[in-house]
Image (spheres, grey):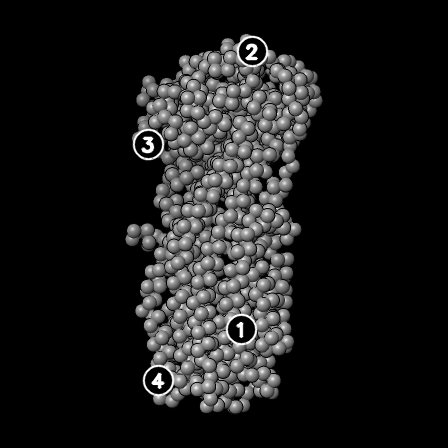
Amino acid sequence: MKSARTSSQAWLAPGKKTGKRAALLSVLAGLLWIGQAGIVARALGALLQGGPVQPILAGLLFALLGAARAILNYWSETLAQTAADAVIRQARDAIVRAETGRTDDNPFGGAGAIAALAGEKLELLGPFLTRFGLARARVVVLPVTILALAFWLSWAAGVILLLAGPLIPVFMALIGLAAKEASARQMAEIGTLNDFLVERLSALVDIRLLGAGDRVMAGFAAQAGDLRARTMAVLRVAFLSSTVLELFAAIGVAMVAVFVGFSLLGALSFGTWGAPLSPEAGIFLLLLAPEFFQPLRDLAAAWHDKAAADAVLEEVAIHAADPGLSLPGQGARVPPLPGPSAVTLRGCRLPSGKTLPDITIQPGERVAVVGASGAGKTSLLRLVAGLTVLDQGEVHVAGQPLSDANADAWRARLGWMPQAPHFLTGSLRANLTLGRQGDLAHALGVAAATDVAQTLPRGLNTRLGETGGGLSGGEARRMTLARAILSSPDLILADEPTADLDPATAKLVTAGLLSEAARGATLIVATHDPELVAQLDRVIDLAAAG
Amino acid sequence: MKHLWPILEHIWRDQRSALMRGAALMAVVLAMGAALLGLSGWFITAAAVAGLAGTGAMFDVFRPSALVRFLALGRAAARYGERLLTHDATLRALESLRLRVLAAYLASPHDRMLRVRGAQALSRLTADIDALDGLSLRLALPVLAGGVVLALALAAQWALTGPVLAMWIIGGYFLGALWVARRAARRMVPLSRRTEMAAQAFRARLIDMIRARNDLAIYGQLEVQRKAVQVAEDRRFALRNALNRAERQVGLMLALLATLVSAGTLALGLAAAQAGRLAPALGAMAFFAALALAEVVAPLRRALSDFGRMVDAARRVGRNLSSPPTIADGAPEGAVELVAQGLDLTRPGGQIPIIAGLSFALHPGETVALTGPSGSGKSTLLLAFAGLHKPVAGQILLGGVSIVKWPETALRSVLTLLPQRSALMAGTVAEALALSGTDSESDLWTALRAVQLEGVITAKGGLSARIGSRGAGLSGGEARRLALARALLRRPQVLLLDEPTEGLDDHTAPAVLAGIRSYLPQAAILIAAHRPAEINFADRIIGLK
């Protein structure tokens, strides 16, 4: 618990200093109201007692102080926003950097969850950092100041406010309870309804094909109605707590007003330090009494921002908790590593504890890597590609140990065919070239993908959606092959290039790979496919070796 | 604003009484607040006048002080009621908005159904709907209630203090708020739209970077992509900053407006009282009421800060709500036979035909396999037969009637397609199967037996076993067979199956196919076949190239 708190404090640190200045300005703005109340009280008091009154001057002074208060508040909010931005930007930057520097998936969640955290969830820190800190600072200073003023003018008015004083901790507990429930219901209520909706939207085609539209709509309406009934039951209780707070505030203000009224009438002769309460002091007290309670109410309103922010900070900490496997190199484009493209593995042990046999692969060799799933075929390919850091052992490429320093240069010589590619949002062409030069028409031809590209709605300019929309599994595989051979790589790493393909497509992909080998490229292919294995020079069986 | 109206109209039509109740109570709270402060000011000043004149004993203290207490307590109570009613109205509004979105998508063309299925499209749609949740609570109700209260205050002030102060206070707030709102809305709407676009770009680029990070690292593009993420973030940050600044400016303007109105009231009231045109207590009342009425315009800040986002969301959501029904009317009669005549098909969205001049007939009781390499159009053809994809040329006849003329309900009761990827929703096995419209337990078990799932489901705890979101808790093959059982329960005369035994082992696949046939002995079955088991099972094979 304590460590969670310190770590969330660390995330909030960048905004600390500016946040304090913002709080100071906010308190100053609050104090200005006392001056405004004084001007009004003096003018009205003078009017009643027949003294000299200058309406224009009173109005002008009131307006000047009011304008100063508005500007101070604006300034304070601007500073608070700057502080919030510093916190949000740093956390967001940390998330993006962490995701760039690792090669395995974050146990925190999928890409969508991480993007939601880095995007809209971090924004939830904004309301907390801009409202809560300011409200807390005002709570500390303003009620005490007003209480002191009230006592100075009339001990009875002070006592009325003070009676509310011991109640403040009670208020705060009530507020805490209310806010906890309120934020819980906000998550539950809208979140659940959205889950219902998302579930049904994902199944639209099925619903339509089953002729189940009316049934699903009726079910959704019933679930939503049920959810509303339950939410309202929670709200009836949650709102009660804040109503109690308001009720006490209202009673406090009304009691001050009634006390002042009776005193001025002369019906009450106690409550002051000797002289009877002047109209000026009475009006002054009436103007200040609501402001005694206002900071408390502001804090109550900002409380659920805090609950939301705490939840977000917790998620940020979870995301940062596992740094994962760091990526050797930067993943930047650099000139290729010179030297023959031989690969040697010696005494390699993976972070998972798995060991790999010692392997040497000469330039131009065509090697099949086989073994049951889980034997480490993909790990071997990732190791050669410099995507995995070893626990033990060494990988030599082009005659030197593969390291952080030369990983980018080594990767510039590779062609990579993953099993399940993710296409980027953008055109097919951009996905194939990935910023590289090369003969795209030739690459598509070798990969037997020319006609696939042609039948797409806008050819190579077709935009690929989130999962490579518009391409079937076999087509996506051929595109991945075309992408791999675009830059005439010296070594092609292919992970199950023919899995789940129909025989005709599997033949096309195999032929594409072999024609690259004929050009002189080394092939390392992890596969189950006996037909593909039969066409390669050498088989490394990881099960047998391991 | 023109984008928001249709959505407001929908909500208004569905939830009129809840909204009226909420607005009414909101107005009551605001009015009581102004009355409370105004009355207190009057009471104290009048008491002071009476006290100074020595006529304190004649002054009726009890009615005003009772009224002060009533207003104070009543306001807190009304506020409680207001919170409940407006939240009830909001919940109802967001419920009906979601229902309308769902209804509109259920009636939309197939490609749009597919488009909304993606994670990003879904998250965007739900974010848009969430943005619209505040439409009634933060925008419509406060504006409505505020207008009512200002009108009431105008009448009360006019009666008590005369036209000058009444016009100054209410006119000032009304015109000032109008000016602030117009000015802010004009700036914030385009800014919100661009901010949202930048946020989407950031999101998409970050997701791309995470999902494709290994590929990007190998092709030396990781740094480039990271910079692209950073660029999107910087743009979003700059826009978001401008938006926040605009919101703070609205706050500043409204605070200045309240100060100006109150200060003016103070000066006017003092001057009038000094000249003897107005009782001092009424002048004080006007000033205190002016202070309290700032509460009427204060919600504008929050409303305006969300306004741009709401308009942007309404633009997209509203477009999706206004989808025309896609199915024409016509009456089906006679035995059904599926016939394709000279069919030309493109991929969805494509121009070049992948199937040209295809003609064949599918008779009741026969099983036909469609074969061909991936990309040869098997799935597209099944979608066309199910009325989800329009042919470029030729026609599809079902029972002698063109498929486009079949009413949706009749078509679905006669023909069922098991698509390549089917979705299971969270719930029990029984609920998943009941989507077919059948919920008799013995029927469900019969269908489960036909697809070789009886043992699996029994082991999981029977029909009440729970399935997670998107079929979680079932293996790929089990989910496939559950979807198949659901299709069988429709008892269609024409059953279209897209790779029905995908993910099943060589032993289970033939058993499942045999189960399908014995469950529906008379049905015409067309299979987009992928593996030998499916091809061997067919009576006839149609090869696509």
Is B372 above or below relative to A192? above
Are the numbered discs 3 and 4 placed on the same chain, yes or no? yes
Neighbor class of circle 4 (other Cα within 10 Å; few <14, some 14-19, many 20+) is some
Report the Cα–Cα distance between label 1 and label 4: 29 Å
Report the Cα–Cα distance between label 3 and label 2: 53 Å
- Secondary structure, mark 4, is loop
Instruction: Give, as a three-letter code, the residue at label 1.
Output: Ala
Instruction: Give, as a three-letter code, the residue at label 3.
Output: Ser
Is B141 above or below relative to A408? below
Q: Residue at x 54, y 20 (%)?
A: B492
- Secondary structure, mark 3, is loop
Instruction: Write down the chain letter for disc 1.
Output: B
Label pair 3/4, CB-CB below 8 angstroms: no
Report the Cα–Cα distance between label 3 and label 4: 82 Å
Instruction: Give, as a three-letter code, the residue at label 2.
Output: Glu
Residue tagged by mark 4? A270
Quarter the C terminus of chain B occupies: top right
Are the numbered discs 1 and 4 placed on the same chain, yes or no? no
Report the Cα–Cα distance between label 2 and label 4: 103 Å
Report the Cα–Cα distance between label 2 and label 1: 84 Å
Residue tagged by mark 3? A352
Are the numbered discs 2 and 4 placed on the same chain, yes or no? no
Label pair 1/3, CB-CB below 8 angstroms: no
Camera-near label (3 vs 2) is 2
- Secondary structure, mark 2, is loop
Instruction: Write down the chain letter for disc 3.
Output: A
The front one of A159 and B385 is A159
> x, y (%) of residue A466?
53, 35
Camera-near label (2 vs 4) is 4
The image quarter in which residue B389 lies:
top right
